Amino acid sequence: MRLIIFGPPGAGKGTQAGLLEQRRGLVQISTGDIIREAMKNETPVGKEAKAYVEKGELVPDTVVRKLAENAIADEGYDDYVLDGYPRTTQQAEWLTEFGEENDTPIDAVLSLEVPDAVIVERLSRRRVHAETGETYHLDHDPPPDSVDPDLIVQRDDDKPETIRNRLSVYREETQPLEDYYADRDALVTVDGQGDIEEVYTRIETALDERVAA
Ligand code: AMP
């Protein structure tokens, strides 16, 4: 199965894509994770992306396209969930073409719906493990005592002013993709509020209904 998980920053895309990987055997392909890794390793792509990511802006389409297409090809073109790609109409069009060329179109686009107030609260309380990238929420999913507290950090782009910018970029550039995929009869909306397992159950139900339809 080939899926996209879609929604505003902080909607829980990464968390739910991780569960789809563990439980449905889909490989999670996160362009955000790929970019952060490239930044950590100071590769040419990482150096180019840094200024955009730190301001909460999108990395240029042509750069991200290559990262996403290479990652999909590396996984054999199937059984993946794209997390954070596509984010612009141009990226979506390229992805549609890529699917057509390889005869592996996207099966469904899961859209996680979460109100802005919940997003700001989630992102400002989000922390990550500096080495593993594991994410936590200070109130709902705190890091265990066994983890060295010095390794628990806040992503630079989770600071309040950057969160606001990421949300406005999302509204302008990414939200229109809902219509793009609704027009192609691929959109499946899921309520992204509530606890992680609750949302995951909704996703499973929505996917099963779609497969049965
Ligand atoms: P994420 O972890 O998905 O929130 O991504 C973190 C940052 O990486 C974003 O704020 C962008 O700067 C960049 N990024 C990730 N995916 C994309 C994409 N598909 N297009 C452009 N920029 C991206």
Image (tube, rainbow, N blue to C red):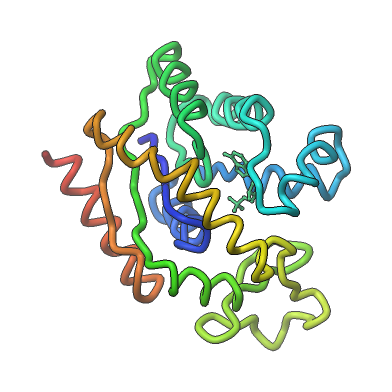
Query: If the image is split into quadrants, where does the N terminus sit?
Result: top left
Relative to residue 59, is residue 94 drawn left or right? left
Residue at horizontal 66 percent and vertical 47 percent from the top: 57
Residue that appears at 76% across and 47% down? 37
Residue 33 at x, y percent in the picture: 66, 49
Left or right: residue 167 versus residue 145 is left
Query: 90 or 143, which is in the foreground?
Result: 90
Task: Point out residue 72 in the picture as x, y percentages from the top left corner.
Answer: 54, 29
Please name the residue shown 36% across and 24% down the image.
Answer: 105
What x and y, as percent, mark residue 83? 51, 46
Q: Is residue 187 above or below residue 153?
A: above
Give the vertical position of 35 relative to 162 (above or below): above
How far across and how far down the image is residue 16, in percent? 44, 58
From the viewer's side, name the closer residue of 128 and 73.
128
Q: Residue furthest top?
A: 101
Residue occupying the far left of the picture: 213
Q: Residue visible at 67% across and 32% down?
A: 60
Please state, as top left, top right, bottom left or bottom right, where the C terminus lies in the image: top left
Q: Is residue 196 above or below residue 139?
A: above
Answer with left or right where residue 5 lies relative to residue 182. right
User: What is the count of numbered marks?
Assistant: 0
